[in-house]
Image (cartoon, helix red, strand yellow):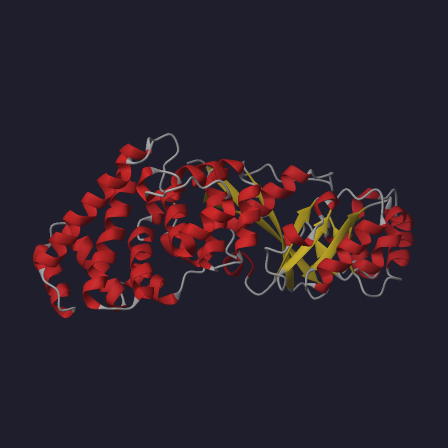
Amino acid sequence: MENSYIGRQSILDNNLNIYGYEIFFRDKKFNYYSNFPKISVEETARIIMNILTYVDFKEILGDKKGFIKISPDLLEGEFLDVLPPEQTVFQLVGVTDVTKYLISSCDDLREKGYEIAICTGNTYERILPLLDSVDYIKVDITDFSDDIELKKAADTLKEFLNAKLIAYKTENEKDFLLAKELGFDLFQGHFFEEPKFYAVKSISSSKVSLIQLLKLTIKEEDIKKIEEFFKTNPDLSYKLLKYVNSPFFYLRQKISSIRQAISILGYRNLQKWVVLNLFAIDGVNIKHNPILERAIVRGKMMEFLTKKITDDFDSYDKSYLVGMLSLIGIALGKDTKEILEELNVSDDIKSAILEYKGNLGKLLKSIIELEYEKIDDAKKILEELGLTLEDLLKAEVDAISYYENFISNIN
């Protein structure tokens, strides 16, 4: 996997304390500089997707706000409100025409707790009708012919008392002192800090979609919302219908709708299906995928063993997920802890995978010890749970049999 880069640049207040950060996402480390260009709908969608996948808001932002560039053409709450409102500022770029729709869209997002920033320069008069519906006005101070023109702009924009003025491209001490004198509230530029970049592993767009779908199933979102997700991902819809209609399920009639397929599978089985797809390494035949094989075998072993120590059905479902997700870091080339945080899995699943805590954690540890042929260590763990080495070995045989049956039914 190639590296991509998440970047940030500080936005400071009058006392030079950090107020927030502008977040960048770029494929190449130094391809970040822009002078408020128009941003396409496609690029906005890609930015949001990558932020959802790669950005740990606590790690990148701390308790500060994150300013994210978006296209005004995609200012719809249904798409954008996947980001945390308490820390997200949507930064509109390339606004040339203020419409009633644009104003109402800004107002709707603000009602949901988001803040709106608008980027402008010497054409600021065009956006005046929108400024009662924004929280920040970001001004490129290098876009003015002289200090008099910049002062005129600042005086006009300061009339919008609900919005903070940000002096963008503050490149030296003279720029900072002038902007401060003119009444700007916040400051951003190379004078204070060069953008800092963090390398992250790129994930294919198909896996980004699967991670989003897994989040929906773990949260047990309404079936209608999950169905809508499939409608925007026809390739996944095809795979799901093909899976449900496979001989593996022995259904009497063909399933022809996504809603029907979701209802038959249920949340837990849908989670399993999504995780299976995440393990399908790009370009590798699913039938010859050793990571996928190990993940399914671990999951089924966990399930078989859990049924021997508890009658709790919820634990059965969790046990399979623990087994499979224990290898998710290898499948995606990312840190397992980061992925589990992104997916918002329950604490007992997380602690079982990361720290081998609880009965699920002990079972997982015994399976891993068996994989490394540490038989004595596996036996000690099993004894704590009232299980034997024979139980573990039988679970492995049954799990391998299950995997072979499963794979043989894939076309």
Residue positioned 73% across, 61% down in the render? 110
Q: In this view, does 282 lie to the left or right of 387?
A: right
Where in the figure is residue 406, as x and y percent of width and height?
Answer: 27, 41
Q: Is residue 249 left or right of residue 266?
A: left
Q: In this view, does 239 lie to the left or right of 19?
A: left
Q: Nearer the viewer, residue 400 or 241?
A: 241
Q: Does residue 211 appear in the picture of this structure?
A: no
Q: Nearer the viewer, residue 42 or 399?
A: 399
Residue positioned 84% across, 60% down in the render? 132
Q: In this view, does 47 lie to the left or right of 290?
A: right
Residue positioned 69% across, 37% down in the render? 40
Q: Say which quadrant the C terminus sits in.
A: top left
The total number of labels drawn is 0
Where in the figure is residue 167, as x and y percent of width and height?
Answer: 76, 54
Where in the figure is residue 43, as x and y percent of width and height?
Answer: 63, 39
Where in the figure is residue 30, as x and y percent of width and height?
Answer: 57, 38
Q: Based on the displayed image, in which of its 4 quarters is residue 185 positioned?
A: bottom right
Q: Say which quadrant the N terminus sits in.
A: top left
The answer to whether residue 330 is above or below residue 289 is below
Q: Nearer the viewer, residue 4 or 291?
A: 291
The answer to whether residue 12 is above or below residue 5 is below
Q: Does residue 397 appear in the picture of this structure?
A: yes
Q: Based on the displayed image, in which of its 4 quarters is residue 319 positioned?
A: bottom left
Residue positioned 76% across, 54% down in the render? 105
Residue furthest front as drawn: 252
